[in-house]
Image (spheres, helix red, strand yellow):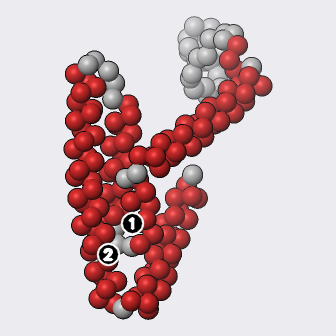
């Protein structure tokens, strides 16, 4: 996971720079900067509209005594979308705008759930192979120190060289 994050922090800015250069070469510097500002403004507006809607649905769910799990997920996606759209770049903007589309969020949620399920199954199988899930015995956590044979832990009580 750390390698993936490292590669993202390395490759995404390089990709963004390349796209900036290409688009700037096609339409010029000022229109490119204008597009960046426009996507930030549109993203902020969209975040406000969808965020308030999601918040209203979450309140309604909680008033009915239900956990607003879907709304929490949508809210998290909207926060990520807003951050991506405020970050200058066309690649991050594309992914940010995609997160505003409910169908894309649903597909992403299903992919994440599938991955979590797969990882959970692998971990359970590993435990089954080792026999850790048998529940046999009590586990006691502690530390130990090796003591030489000629050392009496209780001097003066017999059994050791100091008695």
- Element type at marker 1? helix
Snapshot quadrant of residue 90? bottom left
Front residue of this view, candidates 54 and 125 = 54
Q: Is mark 2 on a helix, strand or loop?
A: helix
Vertically, is 160 above or below 48?
A: above
Q: In this view, does 63 lie to the left or right of 3?
A: left
Total residue callouts: 2
User: What is the x, y in percent for residue 116?
Assistant: 58, 37
The answer to whether marks 1 and 2 mark residues whose Cβ atoms lie closer than 8 Å is yes
Residue 112 visible at all: no
Q: Distance between the residues labelled 1 and 2?
A: 9 Å
Question: Along the horizontal axis of the image, is 163 left or right of 149?
Answer: left
Residues 136 and 119: in front is 119
Q: Which mark is residue 36?
A: 2
* Place of residue 19 in the rendered image (x, y in percent of width and height, measured from the top left): 47, 80
Up/down of 77 relative to 137, above or below: below
**Residue 93 numbered tag:** 1
Q: Where is residue 131 in the image (x, y as percent from the top left)?
A: 74, 20
Image quadrant assignment for residue 68: top left
| Residue at 28% from the left image edge and 26% from the top image edge | 61
Location of residue 163 in the rendering, given as x and y in whole percent from the top left corner? 61, 13
Residue shown at 39%/66% (left/top)? 93
As drawn, 70 above or below 21: above
Residue at the image point whose x is 38% and y is 48% from the top? 77
Q: Which mark is residue 42?
A: none
The structure residue drawn at horizontal position 29% and vertical position 61%, both measured from the top left corner, is 43
Q: Nearer the viewer, residue 125 or 139?
A: 125
Question: Local crowd at mark 1 within 10 Å, few (<14), some, or many (≥20)?
Answer: many
Category of crowding for the residue at label 2, using alpha-carbon neighbours closer than 10 angstroms: few (below 14), some (14–19), many (at least 20): some
Mark closest to the chain's N terminus, 1 or 2: 2
Q: Is residue 127 left or right of residue 95?
A: right
Q: Is residue 3 visible?
A: yes
């Amino acid at each position: 996971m750390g390698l993936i994050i490292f590669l993202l922090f390395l490759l995404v800015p390089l990709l963004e720079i390349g796209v900036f250069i290409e688009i700037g070469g096609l339409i010029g510097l000022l229109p490119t900067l204008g597009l960046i500002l426009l996507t930030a403004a549109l993203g902020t507006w969209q975040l406000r509209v969808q965020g308030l809607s999601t918040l209203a649905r979450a309140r309604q769910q909680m008033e009915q005594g239900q956990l607003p799990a879907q709304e929490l997920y949508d809210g998290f996606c909207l926060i990520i979308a807003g951050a991506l759209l405020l970050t200058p770049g066309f690649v991050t903007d594309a992914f940010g705008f995609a997160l505003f589309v409910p169908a894309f969020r649903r597909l992403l949620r299903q992919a994440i759930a599938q991955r979590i399920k797969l990882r959970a199954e692998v971990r359970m199988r590993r435990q089954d192979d080792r026999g850790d899930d048998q529940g046999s015995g009590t586990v006691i956590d502690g530390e130990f120190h090796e003591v030489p044979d000629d050392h009496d832990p209780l001097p003066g009580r017999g059994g050791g060289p100091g008695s």
